[in-house]
Amino acid sequence: MPIKPAYRYFYPIDWPELSASVRFDRAGGRCEQCRRPHGETIHHLGDGRWFDPLDELWRNDRGEEIDWPAYRDYAALKQMKVVLATAHLDHDPGNNRPGNLKALCQRCHLRNDRKEHRRRARITVLKRRALGDLLNGPYPD
């Protein structure tokens, strides 16, 4: 996942190498949460179940092997290209300890960051409201 230019200086200079070592050396090119393989186009059902093309079996969203889906479930089949990113588990880009970094696919990365994204969105709304109060007076009831 590309780093926004405004946040680039929060990351260490060797971030590309550090990220690659987490994703490919430590995780072996698979998501550390659900085992989706980097660079592969996978088939999924939207509820966390997906077909692992490397092992030729179905997995759940925790990467565990599961039974093949029922025939009627195949109507919801979708495709997705998997891209691994290195996630900071505590959302601090300056904390690059190995225990704080995890190789995650886009689905797991968004799930991991959900609370932090909601927190930041709430702060943004409150800042805009405060700025509106400051410049335009309070909001009408």
Image (cartoon, rainbow, N blue to C red):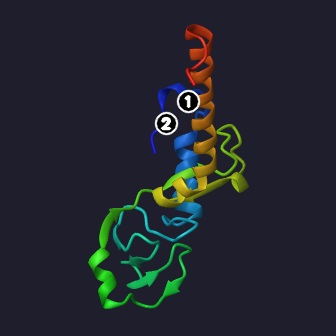
Q: Quadrant of residue 32?
A: bottom right
| Residue 109 spot, x, y in % from top left | 54, 55
Q: Residue flagged by tag 1: what amino acid is it? A: Tyr
Q: Residue flagged by tag 2: what amino acid is it? A: Ile
Residue 68 or residue 100, whichever sits in front: 68
27 lies above or below 116 = below
Q: Residue at x 57, y 30 (%)?
A: 125
96 lies above or below 32 = above
* Residue at the disc numbered 2: 3
Residue 89 or residue 94, whichever sits in front: 89
Q: Quadrant of the C terminus?
A: top right
64 lies above or below 2 = below
| Residue 118 spot, x, y in % from top left | 59, 44
| Residue 28 spot, x, y in % from top left | 52, 66
The numbered disc on residue 7 is 1
Q: For the residue labelled by badge 1, is the local secondary structure a helix, a strand or a loop? A: helix
137 lies above or below 90 = above
Q: Residue at x 56, y 54 (%)?
A: 21
Residue 121 or residue 135, whichever sits in front: 135
User: Are circles 2 and 1 on residues that touch, CB within 8 Å?
Assistant: yes
